[in-house]
Image (spheres, rainbow, N blue to C red):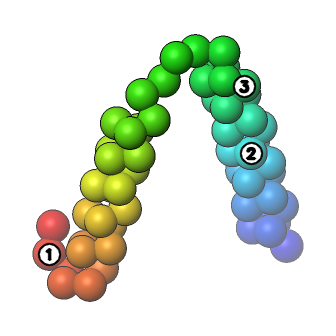
Amino acid sequence: MIRFVIIAVVVIVAWLLLLKLFRQMKEARVDWTGVATIIGFIVLAVYLHYATGMG
C-alpha cells in the first residue's frame, strides 16, 4: 500500500512538471524536429538495450 501511494505521488508530480514544461514551450520558439529526433534516439537506445541486452 505504501508503494502505491509513493508511485501515485511520483506520477502526479511528473504530470505537473510536464504540464508546466508544455506551457513554457508553448510560449517559446522550439525546433520540434530536433526535439523529436532526440526523443527518438533515446527510445531507440532503450529498446535496443532490452532487445539485445547490450549497452
- Of residues 36 and 9, the one drawn nearer to the viewer in this rendering: 36
Q: Amino acid at mark 1?
A: Met
- Of residues 10 and 2, the one drawn nearer to the viewer in this rendering: 10
Answer above or below: position of 6 versus 50: above
Label 1: element kind: loop
Which residue is denoted by mark 1 in the rendering?
Answer: 54
**In this image, 51 relative to 25: left or right?**
left
**Quadrant of res 48:** bottom left
Q: How many discs mark residues in the rendered view?
A: 3
Answer above or below: position of 28 versus 44: above
Q: Which mark is residue 15?
A: 2
Q: How busy is the neighbourhood of tag 2: few (under 14 within 10 Å), some, or many (20 plus)?
A: few
Q: Are marks 2 and 3 in contact (CB under 8 Å)?
A: no
Q: Looking at the image, is mark 1 or mark 3 nearer the viewer?
A: 3
Which residue is denoted by mark 3 in the rendering?
Answer: 23
Q: Residue at x 45, y 35 (%)?
A: 32
Residue 17 visible somewhere in the drawing = no
Closer to the chain start, of discs 2 and 3, is 2
Q: Using the numbered discs, state the Cα–Cα distance from disc 2 to disc 3 in whole angstroms.
A: 12 Å
- Of residues 4 and 35, the one drawn nearer to the viewer in this rendering: 35
Question: Which image quarter is the C terminus in?
Answer: bottom left
Answer above or below: position of 25 versus 40: above
Residue 52 visible somewhere in the drawing = yes
Q: Amino acid at mark 3?
A: Arg
Q: Using the numbered discs, state the Cα–Cα distance from disc 1 to disc 2 in whole angstroms.
A: 31 Å
Q: Using the numbered discs, state the Cα–Cα distance from disc 1 to disc 3 in whole angstroms.
A: 37 Å
Q: Looking at the image, is mark 2 or mark 3 nearer the viewer?
A: 3
Closer to the chain start, of discs 1 and 2, is 2
